[in-house]
Amino acid sequence: RVFIRVDFNVPQDKKDPSIITNTARIDAALPTIKYALDNGAKSVVLCSHLGRPNGQKSEKYSMKPVAKVLEERLCKPVTLLHDVVGAEGGGAGANPPPGSVIFL
């Protein structure tokens, strides 16, 4: 398994934050992600964030739009975890299927 810290702090549409207005940072990470998958990594775990004002979760800062673009660009499913601790976070990385992309 490979863990990659990626900078997916991408610009989003001000009226509709589900729309990414510039995918350059995502596109720049694709060769590294593909290289890991193509060269024997059982899975790739990606880690990034958009923000958490005052320590609170906010849908405005969800990584869902980024995960959607990643799926489109990689042509494979991306599992977006909503929490990195507990059953969801620990369970997803314990024994993922070969070729998995997990996004924290």
Image (cartoon, rainbow, N blue to C red):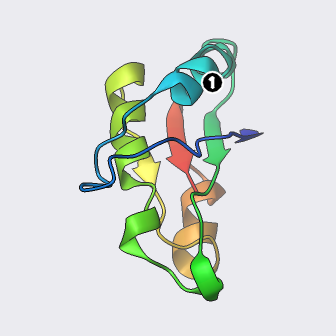
Q: Measuring 52% from the left and 38% from the top, which residue is drawn there? A: 101
Which residue reaches farthest left? 16
The amino acid sitting under disc 1 is: Ala
17 vs 43, nearest the viewer = 17
Q: In this rendering, would 95 be left or right of 71?
A: right
Q: Quadrant of the C terminus?
A: bottom right
Is residue 75 at least partly visible in the picture? no
Q: Measuring 47% from the left and 42% from the top, which residue is drawn there? A: 11
Name the residue beneath numbered marker 1.
29
Relative image position of residue 65 (x, y in whole percent): 35, 47
Choose top left, top right, bottom left or bottom right for residue 29.
Answer: top right
Q: Measuring 68% from the left and 27% from the top, which residue is drawn there? A: 41
Which residue reaches farthest front? 14
Q: In this rendering, would 33 be left or right of 14?
A: right
Relative image position of residue 15 (x, y in whole percent): 25, 56
Q: Is residue 1 above or below residue 52?
A: above
Is residue 50 at least partly visible in the picture? yes
Q: Is residue 80 above or below residue 44?
A: below
Near mark 1 (Cα within 10 A), the count class, few <14, some 14-19 or many ≥20, is some
Q: In this rendering, would 19 be left or right of 42?
A: left
Q: Measuring 51% from the left and 37% from the top, which residue is drawn there? A: 100
- Is disc 1 placed on a helix, strand or loop? helix
